[in-house]
Amino acid sequence: MKLTLRTNYLVLLSLIIFISTSCRKTNPLDDTTDDVSIEDLIIPDNFDFSTTRTFQISISDVEENVKYDIYSLSEMGVEDIIYGENDTTVVIDDLNQKLTSGFVKTGSYITLITVPSYHKYLYLVRNKNGVFYGKNIEITGSDINYNYTGNGNKSLLVANDILYAVNGNSTEVRTIDLGTNIVSTVGNLPFTSIANAIDIVNQRMYTANNKAPYEYGYYDLNTGSFTQLGNMPWNFPRMDYNHSDGMLYISKNSKLYKLDPSNAQFLQTYNIVGFGNQGWGDVAFTNNGTLYFATKDGIYEGSFSGTTVNVVKLSDPTLPTNLTSIAAGSNGKLYTTHNANSKIIEFDPTTGSWQYITISQNITINDFGMLRYVSPATDTDGDGVPDDQDDYPTDPDRAFNNYFPGENTWATLAFEDLWPYKGDYDFNDLVVGYNINQVTNADNNVVDIRSKWDVRHNGAGFNNGFAFEIGADASAIASVSGYSHTAQNIPMNPNGTEAGQTKANFVVFDETNPNLGQTIDHYILLNTPLSPLTIGSPPYNPYIFVNGNTNVEVHLPDYEPTELADQSFIGTGDDTSDPLSGRYYKTSTNLPWVINIVYDFVWMKEKSEINTGYLKFNDWAESGGTQYQDWYKDLPGYRDDNFLDYQ
């Protein structure tokens, strides 16, 4: 039977190749081009066309019950600052993302990390009872071992919420006790300031000079001393400290920036969408990370979506305008001022109602931060992770989300489907975007895998299916849901995995055409939690099976076929796979049939080789991946849009 299937497949494949090569045109604008063909490239034998690198990280800590968040960074500092007439932008790589979270109960936290190849650093954020410590670690290409040997924690409890106020015409630091409404002068800064933020646990008020050279540092709430940590690139009106992630956020006009509070290192830039009037104002976070803005025309709530912050206005026209400050209280209310005066407004973000609060002195307020009353840490689900550090505070089986390539961001798989024969190298026969969340428990083991597969483009003559294989056995899976099997010809195990496979294989869709333009939400529940080292790193081992034939698989270069693949195709046609040496799915010139791009990839126009649209592809491939590791990005000189399909 397999011989008959093989013969039928080869006949159909030969017809497709004949039609494809007869119609091939390198340039969609004319019939001639001076570009080097992708088949003329000299590519190292060991190059696997990966746009990422994966390694193991082991974190140990002198203390128990410590949370770590791990970010991937391209640089340690600012890449570029663009000064505009109405706005100023700090350019930060859009793939700087939080990748994973883990918990050190005792011993070590060990996991796999996958980062873009051009990223140079990991940024570790240690969180012990709300005391944060950030650490840059250079990515050297080998496994990373990190041991924290620091000292213990500080704590601060107050009876009432306390506002710390600064203004641009005085160096005085004033407090407003919201329990008594008494104003006090508690110290002085070495400069005037229009922005500040309170770190409750470390007892610090972060602030910056509103005049050049914009010195940045912290005022110690206990001693009244000031410690300079760096300089800001410009003056800005909005600042707050987010106790849910230990980061400092500043804002100006339609931009929000995330910084390391210990050195003012810029980590991420966000575009704010939805402001009516983007001038003046302030930014505030609640204890759980809910984001609020005040601007000249009102109060807004913000929500993060990748590198965008979408805002919705909460206040109505009765609220006074020209707001200069905002802070979040422990009672769920927001506190703001307008026209930098002492008329403090208490605003209810749930109802939109507001009222003035009378304080004991008239003072000028450009900004204030909130020293909130702190109740003891709670752990509702009893898993050992405090609620404010737990992504699932009421679920004892789950604790952390671990997104790849980052929350609300996408990576892309781009396929050629004529294997074992060469195609036209436009890598658009099937284009699938993906985002994968490995949910882990308090022991850092994977509980379930929640993935999104965006079926974006079908440039093939075939109606292909798509699947992936993880490192765990099929017997380790409890259930699978969310797949799309329209042809209904995939033999399935009762748990939702593909039948006949020792390792767990998941057929996300068995036909491209009915799913084109759709996003498939796929869910895998494990029988018992497993180590990420067993599961593997996203996107695991993805592949297509050609035109409904599950025996004909097309994988990433140097990834093994599954045990159901027809091994008689291996090493035939233009394929030079050699299982004994671990070589798979490459031509004699080392070209692949699949590329995994850690980006929201724009695919090629039909019959246009990928190097005609991506102008640094050749340098990247011929260097074995050492040059232009970000070749797929939209940077100056990187793309020729004439060959890209932006539909």
Image (cartoon, grey):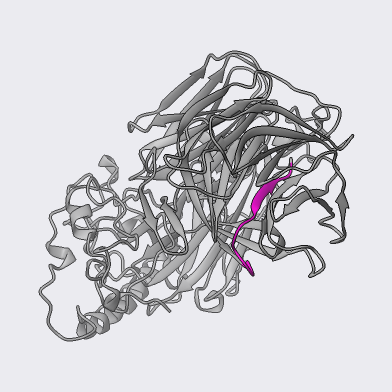
Q: Residue at x 68, y 29 (%)?
A: 130
Along the line of sight, the residue nearer the viewer: 222 or 601: 222
**Is residue 166 visible to the viewer in this orientation of the structure?**
yes
Quadrant of image for the C terminus: bottom left
Picture layout, residue 204 above or below residue 214: above
* Left or right position of 124 against 78: right
Magenta residues: mostly which secondary structure?
loop
Picture layout, residue 2 above or below residue 349: below
Q: Which stretch is magenta? A: 274-286
Q: Position of residue 588 (x, y in %)?
A: 17, 56
Picture layout, residue 591 above or below residue 440: below
Q: Residue at x 50, y 55 (%)?
A: 468
Along the line of sight, the residue nearer the viewer: 526 or 160: 160
Along the line of sight, the residue nearer the viewer: 4 or 261: 261
* Left or right position of 637 against 97: left
Q: Position of residue 383 (x, y in %)?
A: 76, 30
Quadrant of res 492: bottom right
Q: Residue at x 73, y 44 (%)?
A: 286
Q: Position of residue 429 (x, y in %)?
A: 37, 72
Tally of numbered discs: 0
Quadrant of res 104: top right
Quadrant of res 420: bottom left
Along the line of sight, the residue nearer the viewer: 267 or 202: 202
**Is residue 500 visible to the viewer in this orientation of the structure?**
no
